[in-house]
Amino acid sequence: QLVQSTFFPPAEGVMLPTGSFSNRVAFITGGGTGLGRAMTSTLSQLGAQCVIASRKLDVLQQTAEEISSQTGNKVHAVECDVRDPQAVARCVERMETLTGLPDVIINNAAGNFVCPSERLSPNAWRSITDIVLNGTAFVTLELGKRLIQSRKGASFLAITTIYAESGSGFVVPSASAKAGVEALYKSLAAEWGRYGHRFNIIQPGPIRTKGAFSRLDPTGAFEKAMISRIPTGRLGKPAEIANLAAFVSSDYATWMSGAVIRLDGGEYVSMAGEFNELRRVTPDQWKMMEAMIRNTRGS
Ligand SMILES: CCCCC/C=C\C/C=C\C/C=C\C=C\C(=O)SCCNC(=O)CCNC(=O)[C@H](O)C(C)(C)COP(=O)(O)OP(=O)(O)OC[C@H]1O[C@@H](n2cnc3c(N)ncnc32)[C@H](O)[C@@H]1OP(=O)(O)O
Ligand SMILES: NC(=O)C1=CN([C@@H]2O[C@H](COP(=O)(O)OP(=O)(O)OC[C@H]3O[C@@H](n4cnc5c(N)ncnc54)[C@H](OP(=O)(O)O)[C@@H]3O)[C@@H](O)[C@H]2O)C=CC1
């Protein structure tokens, strides 16, 4: 952490009023671990009945039991590989039986690893883009069609990343797929408002989770450099994403659709600004540089 992080301590308590999601059903892909688990915990604390879905049923079941026992609200675990549209259909059918169709859908499941692009096999490319882009599309289309048929409105949220906008070397399948997810959600925000559906996007900056850090910085060698470029001087916390996700999915945000919200401690603009390296210039150096600039005559 950098010194300035003391100005920006994370508030990790649940932000919205108790009961904000009473009588609501939330469906969260990848809800067993990391940020998905944090979002499930927050929505459950706020009264939602949650359904979490991913490949590892044992992980989902353990998370579901832990959260339900803390909040008193049911969390259902449903096995689902989002890459398989038939598995997605079966998962949604199971959810309809358990809870009915959801009010809140969070497409959070993802796969990623750092790799020079020249080392990627076709299957490596397929593996990431299938989880991130096709998985999000299969879940969104399956639920969207059933919600439209039932004339039920819903809030859809996708978790992308700050480099969905800029692109990034060494995570090219993820960058390409996340950019596709953003195009999908912005497009559907325009098309499906008429059915009562909102579509929004959160782009998190770096937040320590086992899933992300073990695949993106396996040796830990890059963490210090990453924190040094974040103006708020620290990594994000899962609860910070969870509070934002709860707000975006709540009745306090019914006028929000098609929004792309970056929550990254300022990392994106910090990396983008051409002159931001001048942060390293000391006051004495500034005196000298200013004198040089002022003494310049003509062009
Ligand atoms: C400057 C550095 C900064 C440091 C940054 C630190 C922190 C993070 C900061 C910001 C994060 C920003 C964005 C984060 C986005 C995320 O999405 S993080 C979430 C990550 N979570 C996961 O990935 C969880 C799920 N992942 C998985 O299950 C697996 O990792 C996988 C995605 C590979 C899918 O598993 P599975 O379906 O079992 O696939 P296979 O093992 O069969 O592999 C499929 C093909 O892919 C090839 N492959 C696998 N790993 C690699 C690798 N490391 N390098 C190259 N290729 C790989 C594998 O060989 C298979 O291909 P072939 O069949 O061999 O051709
Ligand atoms: N942590 C960070 O710094 C950042 C994370 N993000 C995004 O946040 C989200 C959560 O990531 P994070 O919590 O860090 O990482 P995790 O690895 O903990 O979360 C990924 C989840 O996706 C699930 N998943 C993976 N493949 C599939 C599949 N084929 N079908 C269904 N579920 C699947 C995994 O469960 P299972 O293995 O059981 O299938 C896991 O629960 C992702 O969208 C990621 O891109 C974005 C920017 C920064």
Image (cartoon, grey):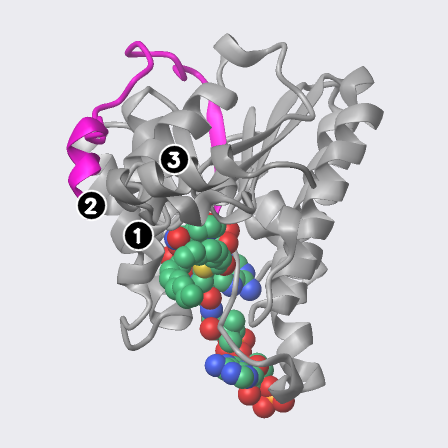
- Evaluate if marks 3 and 2 touch, with contact meaning CB atoms under 8 Å apart: no
Answer above or below: position of 115 versus 20. Answer: below
Q: Nearer the viewer, residue 167 or 50?
A: 167
Is the shortest distance between ligand 2 and the CB of mark 3 under 8 Å? Answer: yes
As for residue 3 lying within the magenta part, the answer is: yes
Give the main secondary structure, helix, strand or loop, of the magenta stretch.
Answer: loop
Q: Amino acid at mark 2?
A: Leu
Q: Marks 1/2: CA distance?
A: 7 Å
Q: Which numbered mark, 3 or 1, is in the foreground of this view?
A: 1
Residue 143 shown left or right of residue 100 in the figure:
right
Residue 2 numbered mark, or none? 2
Answer above or below: position of 70 versus 168. Answer: above
Q: Which residue is mark 1?
A: 228
Label 3 SS: helix
Q: Quadrant of ligand 2?
A: bottom left
How far across and how far down the image is residue 22, in percent? 39, 15
Q: Nearer the viewer, residue 86 or 204?
A: 204
Q: Which residue is mark 3?
A: 241
Residue sitting at 26 percent across and 54 percent down? Answer: 62
| Lower sequence index among marks 3 and 2 | 2
Q: Residues within 10 Å of mark 2 (few under 14, many from 20)?
A: some
Q: Which stretch appears magenta?
A: 1-29
Q: Marks 3/1: CA distance?
A: 21 Å
Residue sitting at 43 percent across and 49 percent down? Answer: 277
Q: Which numbered mark, 3 or 2, is in the foreground of this view?
A: 2
Q: Marks 3/2: CA distance?
A: 21 Å
Q: How many numbered discs sit on the rendered protein?
A: 3
As for residue 181 lying within the magenta part, the answer is: no
Residue sitting at 64 percent across and 80 percent down? Answer: 117
How far across and how far down the image is residue 75, in percent? 35, 38
Q: Nearer the viewer, residue 218 or 97?
A: 218
Q: Amino acid at mark 3?
A: Ile
